[in-house]
């Protein structure tokens, strides 16, 4: 009987942890992003924007998913 009780307590504890992490995920998903699209990305961003050389924030990949354009934003300019 002691063995079954330990398994039951372990199962209930696991379910409570899963529920708590799910609730935390739901609550943290509704926050505003840290950086918005109109904030400067680097010290040279205003310079690039004025000269129409600013790279887009997001690109669409070959599967149609929106991905951040890290290479365009952080890489060298042509």
Image (cartoon, grey):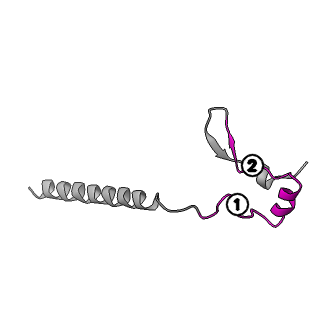
Question: Which residue is at the far top?
Answer: 62
- Which residue is identified by label 2? 56
What residue is drawn where x is 31% and y is 57%? 19
Q: Secondary structure at mark 2?
A: loop
What residue is drawn where x is 71% and y is 51%? 57
- Which residue is identified by label 1? 38
Q: Percent from the top left, x then y, of residue 5? A: 14, 57
Residue 59 counted in the magenta span: yes
**Are the two marked residues, 2 and 1, in contact with CB atoms closer than 8 angstroms?**
no
Give 58 or 21, whichever is nearer the viewer.
58
Give 35 or 9, whichever is nearer the viewer.
35
Q: Residues within 10 Å of mark 1 (few under 14, many from 20)?
A: few
Q: Determine the image quadrant of residue 10.
A: bottom left
Q: Is residue 31 left or right of residue 20?
A: right
* Marked residue nearer the N-terminal end (2 or 1): 1
Q: Nearer the viewer, mark 2 or mark 1?
A: 1
- Span colored in magenta: 34-61
Q: Is residue 62 left or right of residue 5?
A: right
Q: Percent from the top left, x then y, of residue 69? A: 72, 48
Of the 4 image quadrants, the one containing the N terminus is bottom left
């Amino acid at each position: 009987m002691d063995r079954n009780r330990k398994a039951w307590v372990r199962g209930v504890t696991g379910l409570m942890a899963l529920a708590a992490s799910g609730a935390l995920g739901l609550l943290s998903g509704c926050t505003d992003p840290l950086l918005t699209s109109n904030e400067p990305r680097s010290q040279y961003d205003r310079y690039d924007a004025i000269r129409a050389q600013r790279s887009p924030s997001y690109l669409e990949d070959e599967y149609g998913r929106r991905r951040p354009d890290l290479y365009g934003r952080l890489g060298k300019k042509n």
